[in-house]
Image (cartoon, grey):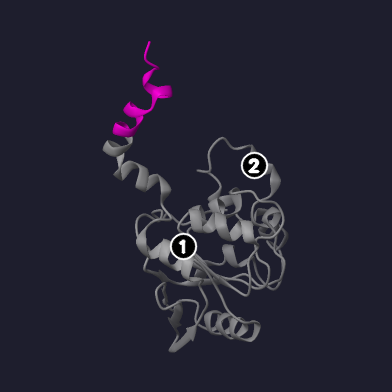
Amino acid sequence: MTAPTASFPVGPIVSVCGTTVVVRGDDIDTDRIIPARFLKCVTFEALGPAAFADDRAELAGDPAGPHPFDRPEHQGASILLVNRNFGCGSSREHAPQALMRWGIRAVVGESFAEIFYGNCLALGIPCFTASHDLMLAIQEAAAAHPSAVFSLDVAAASLEGSGCRWQLELAPGPRQTLASGQWDATGQLLANGTALEATAVRLPYLSGFPG
């Protein structure tokens, strides 16, 4: 199993462009996204190739073809198209980490498990939602044109590609957090290093209590 090489999200996220990969099915849980045996890792760095490891192995010899993540036309895809209650199950951050390190930069689906959604947002991965019928239409269009580049607009919460435009849903809070770059807590800390150091000096439990 291989994973595309891609840079990680950083700063404000106003759009995501790229090809798509469709993974159909409701209630795909985090154990399927990244099986438990891969949680022994000390860092997340090697999780990309293990995304959907068991599903991919199961479909390796299927006459209907391999798992979408193993199909040549989807290598390098950055937009994942899913269905209902994606990312349910355990709260492990490893699931969105694995998707991100495989190359996914945004997910569009009917609905998401709340903790998975929050973990994605903390990594700068927008999760847009659409109705059941609209999601099926998007998946069909993407499957029919696997090499087409699709574009997600965060501010407008819209998806364009294959000659179509779909209106999606993205709550105002996450939309503002992504567009402003506030999702990147580490980046904000690094950008305010001087202010943090000045604050640390004023804190008695860091600088020592007066004698």
Q: Work out which residue is located at the far left of the displayed protein and give it.
A: 194
Between residue 29 and residue 7, name the one nearer to us.
Answer: 29
Residue at x-position 53% and y-position 43%:
44
Dot 2 corresponds to which residue?
A: 39
The amino acid type of the residue labelled 1 equals: Arg
Residue 88 spot, x, y in % from top left? 69, 60
Look at label 2 and name its amino acid: Leu
Relative side of 59 to 17, left or right: right
- Secondary structure under tag 1 reads loop
**Crowd class of label 2 (few under 14; some 14 to 19; many from 20; radius 10 Å):** some
User: Pointer 1: what residue?
Assistant: 105
Q: Based on the picture, tell me whether residue 199 belongs to the magenta stretch.
A: yes
Separation (CA) of disc 2 from disc 1: 22 Å
In the rendered image, the vertical position of residue 129 relative to residue 118, given as above or below: below
Q: Is residue 129 above or below residue 10?
A: below
**Residue found 42% across the figure and 48% down from its top:** 185
Q: Position of residue 155 (x, y in %)?
A: 39, 74
Give SS at disc 2. Answer: helix
Taking the spot 64% from the left edge, 66% from the top edge, the residue there is 66
Query: Does the rendering let one see residue 78?
Result: no
- Side (left or right) of 122 relative to 116: left
Label 1: how many Cα within 10 Å (few below 14, some 14–19, many 20+):
many
- In which quadrant is the C terminus drawn? top left
Q: Which residues are the magenta region? A: 197-211
Magenta-highlighted stretch: main secondary structure?
Answer: helix
Number of labels in the image equals 2
**Residue farthest to the bottom?**
163
Magenta stretch holds residue 109 = no
Whether residue 159 is situated above or below residue 55 in the rendered picture:
below
Name the residue at 30% across, 45% down. Answer: 191
